[in-house]
Each structure stands twice: as C-alpha cells, then as structure tokens.
C-alpha cells in the first residue's frame, strides 16, 4: 500500500483544501493540476482517482509508484517546462525547503497557473512554538539541521518570504493552515501557554506605526496568525490575480 513521504496529515489537509476550493470557487470539477515535486505519487494518485488531470514532476523518478501516470523528471531549480497559465492548480508538498531559490520556484508556479488559479505550498513551519523553542536552544528550526546533501532541508521559508514572493507574482494570500502529528496533552498545554504569551507580547509591542501595514502580523487574520504559530508543518494557499491595468 502506497504511503506518503511526508506526514500523512499534510496530504490529508491538502486534499481537503483542494476539495473545498473546487466545490466553492472553481467552475470546472476536473482540474488540470501540477504536482511539484511528486515524490512516490501518493497525492497524484488520490487526485487522479478523483478525476483530475495531474502532471507530476520530480528530480528523482526512481521512487515513482503509479504505472498509469507518467512522472516527468525535472529539476525544480530550473524553469517548469509548461506554457504560461497551463494549469488550474499547482501543489507543492514539502519541496520548497529543498531548493536554493524559493522565489524562483514561486515565480514559476505562478507563471504556469492561470489567472484565478490556485497555488498550494507546504513546508516546515518555522513560526510554530515548537520550532521557535528548538531555535532558541539549538539555533535551528524544527525539521532543519546542518545540510550536507541536496535532499535535505536547506531553506527555512518564513511567512514574510511567502508574502514577498506572492506580492512579486501578483498572488493573493488565500489561507494559512498548519498541521502536524498528534501530540500529547502535556505538550499541547505547554505549547499553548508559550503561544499565548508570544501573542500577548505581539499585541502589546507590535503596531502599524513602528512596523508598517505590510508587516505579517497585520497582513494575516487572527485565525491565520493562530494557525501560523500552531503545528510544525505550514500550508500556504494563494490565488493568482489578474494583472492591474
């Protein structure tokens, strides 16, 4: 039985988000979807079985496990080999943190997605309380360490980087979600307490006069901010907007 390379909770939530987006915002029920990078094909298989037209890309196709769908071998540090606006939706699960240039990757995802198309990117959440505690003691966020090989996590992408990349590509932030493995009651209680005082500190000391309206604390809703500091895996959803006249 095929299992996901990343945490199952990530794939489950991405599939849930896609189903919700399709039912609420998309006129077509069968979408042209890019899966970059596709890994062993777990989420491609789920989407393909739901009737969508899925194009998987990955630099390593040796792990590919879906005979009925071809996985295109491609290095995502380079331009994605499809024309502008080709896809209705692009997903990228736990990939951007492996790339040397995350902004190039965001630009390419934006380029190959049509106007009003959806982009979903997941990555380790450097804003989570657990990650910030690890960084305080060890100098590395959760799911990052000294990198000696290209397959390891080399690029911790924070919300400010996403907002900058999205703004440059005319992508509107649609949602921010965090997920992760189920934790013990004690862990959840401790992290909730730390998170409460972190948010309290932000409410007291951060304001638009000192930081500006573009500071991420003022770009995200209250619910999105709560998600941002919650679990260890971050899911960012954006909508490609039409260029202003």
Image (cartoon, grey):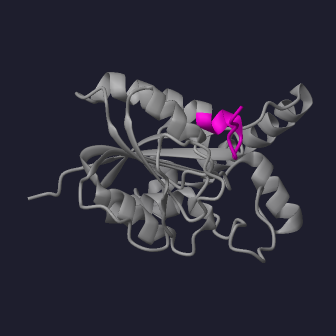
Most extreme residue toward the front, as rendered? 67
Quadrant where the image shows the C terminus: bottom left
Q: Nearer the viewer, residue 142 or 194?
A: 142
**Side of 169 where 215 appears, left or right:** right
| Residue 6 inside the magenta-drawn segment | yes
Residue 28 occupies quadrant: top left
Nearer to me, 110 or 149: 149
| Residue found 43% across the figure and 71% down from its top | 104
| Vertical position of residue 181 compared to residue 211: above or below | above
Q: Position of residue 193 (x, y in %)?
A: 81, 36
Whole-percent x, y for residue 62 in the image: 64, 58
Location of the N terminus (image quadrant): top right
Which residue is drawn at the image coordinates 78% and 77% (left, top)? 148
Residue appearing at x 64%, y 64% in the figure: 156
The answer to whether residue 177 of the structure is visible from this angle is: no
Q: Is residue 137 left or right of residue 87?
A: right
Indicate left or right for 79 with 135 as reference.
left
Image coords of residue 24 (percent x, y): 32, 23
Magenta span: 1-11
Task: Look at the picture and state if 136 lies above or below 48.
Answer: below
Does the magenta stretch mainly form a helix, a strand or a loop?
loop
Q: Using the image, determine if residue 227 lies above or below residue 147.
A: above
| Vertical order, 175 against 154 (above or below) | above
């Amino acid at each position: 039985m095929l299992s996901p390379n990343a945490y199952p909770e990530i794939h489950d939530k991405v599939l849930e988000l896609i189903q919700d987006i399709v039912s609420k915002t998309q006129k077509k029920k069968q979408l042209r979807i890019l899966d970059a990078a596709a890994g062993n094909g777990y989420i491609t298989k789920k989407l393909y079985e739901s009737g969508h037209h899925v194009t998987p890309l990955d630099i390593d196709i040796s792990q590919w496990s879906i005979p009925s769908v071809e996985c295109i071998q491609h290095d995502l540090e380079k331009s994605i080999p499809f024309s502008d606006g080709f896809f209705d939706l692009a997903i990228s699960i736990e990939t951007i943190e492996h790339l040397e240039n995350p902004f190039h990757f965001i630009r390419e995802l934006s380029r190959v997605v049509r106007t009003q198309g959806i982009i979903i990117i997941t990555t380790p959440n450097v804003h989570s309380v657990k990650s910030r505690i690890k960084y305080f003691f060890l100098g590395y966020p959760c799911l990052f360490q000294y990198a000696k090989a290209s397959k390891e996590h080399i690029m911790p992408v924070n919300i400010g980087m996403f907002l900058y990349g999205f703004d440059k590509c005319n992508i509107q932030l649609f949602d921010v979600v965090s997920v992760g493995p189920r934790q013990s009651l004690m862990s959840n209680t401790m992290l909730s307490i730390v998170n409460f005082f972190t948010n309290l500190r932000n409410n007291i000391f951060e304001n638009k006069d000192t930081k500006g309206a573009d500071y991420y604390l003022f770009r995200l809703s209250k619910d999105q901010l709560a998600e941002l500091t919650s679990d260890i895996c971050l899911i960012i959803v954006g909508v490609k907007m039409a260029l202003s006249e």
